Image (cartoon, rainbow, N blue to C red):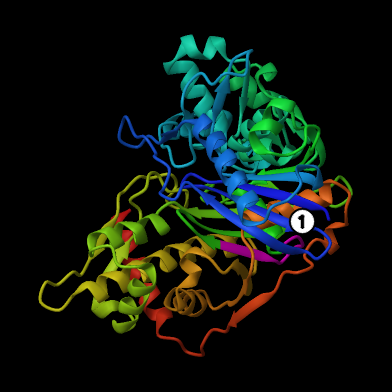
Amino acid sequence: MRYTIGYDIGSSSVKAALLDTDTGKCVATAISPAQEMPMHAPVAGWAEQDPEMWWREVQHATKQLQQIHPFEGSAVAGIGIAYQMHGLVCVDKDQQVLRPAIIWCDSRAVEIGNTAFEKLGPNWCLQYLLNSPGNFTASKLRWVQEHEPGIYERIDKVMLPGDFIAMRLTGDAATTISGLSEGIFWDFSMHQVSPVLLKHYGISGKLLSNVVPTFGVQGKVTAQAAALLGIAAGTPVTYRAGDQPNNAFSLNVLQPGEAATTAGTSGVVYAVHDHIAFDEQSRVNTFVHVNDTAAAHRNGVLMCLNGTGILNSWMRNLVGKPSYEEMNALAAVAPVGSRGLKIYPFGNGAERILANKEIGAEFKGLNFNIHGREHMLRAAQEGIVFALKYGMDIMQDMGLQIKRVRAGHANMFLSPLFREVFANTADVVIELYNTDGAQGAARAAGVGAGLYAVEDAFKGMECLATIEPETNSAYKGIYEEWVEGLKRII
């Protein structure tokens, strides 16, 4: 019996999956902690977490797997890691964390990135980086350099959240080309770390970790880590990727024209293509996809909405903490369009699809005489979908035609109402699968360990449902009204 383990290092929790590589079936899953991990905001617009907390939850989740489906530690053939993108972890020469991680929804580096975009030149940035430096990892590192010079001087390596977990597993500081691209360190034209960007920010290339392939042996588990996890020393780490490229892999979205979506804390649509494409305002972003090769380039265009599941969670607390299933049923009682109530879900930091503006969430048309809980809950789901559609419109203006998307049967896609609104507003077919990021990382780990080829990685995965859009749906007109309202806000 051979297994692989996949970890998904989120900002809310760590998920783990144990995959039986012979059958392609996931035999155990775990989430730790039971409640959401804390996110610290010492200043409005900031978002930080302790990287060591992620590592502790990896240990807890692994022990849960062992309890659910006992397995020999020596039977684990590979470990895959998916992780929250765009974060910054700084460690010293002893691999000790120097400051809390600056995570994906932290807005402190927006102006640094905007200034770099103007000084380097929009044409240069878009031609070579395919993005503005924006509020990404490179700009966050520049912020540390400017505002915390004492810490900056002690940095030996900077890394993404998944790189940190891999380092705790193997003792090796490493990253991938895909990871460098998500940090906006990568020059797509020269196919190397951008010396121009490093020079502009005054960042030494020595702070970046060695590059390892996305699939393949990236390091081996140390005896110390093995003892903590209950697996064998020497077990290889064979895959790592940011959560959205990994989500696409999880759903077998690997070729041009295919798209994946997810709606957890944040909401994402991620479409694969094989050509150079960018949005002139960098409202959506291009990264190197997990299956990119020199012979067949694959990039992923990502649109991200920060205020997705976090709005739904906020609504749940507001209306007395019913179960999400009860919330979905109550929202479905309200009519299409929520009787004119519109919600703009932009209350979780700067939004890329709004050119990194931080406008806050807004409610429009709220009438105390006609609107109740059901209208509020439905308007929240409709507003999230409308914001995702707004980002998809930007992607389609870049030439990406999205007619079919794949999603895991999880998070907001558990809501029949959410699926209905999404399919009809975006005019797309939705395919739902029995997978998630941790399972995808486990499947990818098998590829990296050489157990099977990419095309054989999806054995055991099933399409659970297909949702077709309706003809002449009323949602399209309501969405257009929502967009007109957004134009007045921004």
Residue closest to the eye, 53 or 76: 76
Q: Quadrant of residue 335?
A: bottom left
**Relative to residue 291, is residue 467 drawn left or right?**
left
The image shows residue 477 at horizontal and vertical percentages of 39, 80
Q: Identify the residue at horizontal 72%, vertical 52% (top origin).
A: 442
Residue closest to the eye, 322 or 389: 322
The image shows residue 412 at horizontal and vertical percentages of 46, 66
Assess disc 1: are there few (<14), some (14-19) or many (≥20) residues with their C-alpha within 10 Å of its C-alpha. some
Q: Let me know if residue 212 appears in the view.
A: no
Q: Identify the residue at horizontal 30%, vertical 78% (top origin).
A: 330
Q: Identify the residue at horizontal 47%, vertical 11% (top origin).
A: 149
The mark tally for this picture is 1
Relative to 82, say whether 248 is above or below: below
Relative to 64, say whether 100 is above or below: above
Relative to 262, say whether 133 is above or below: above
The image shows residue 296 at horizontal and vertical percentages of 85, 52
Q: Let me know if residue 434 appears in the view.
A: yes
Report the quarter where the N terminus lies: bottom right
* Residue found at the far bottom of this picture: 471
The residue where tag 1 is placed is 274
Residue range (magenta)? 252-261
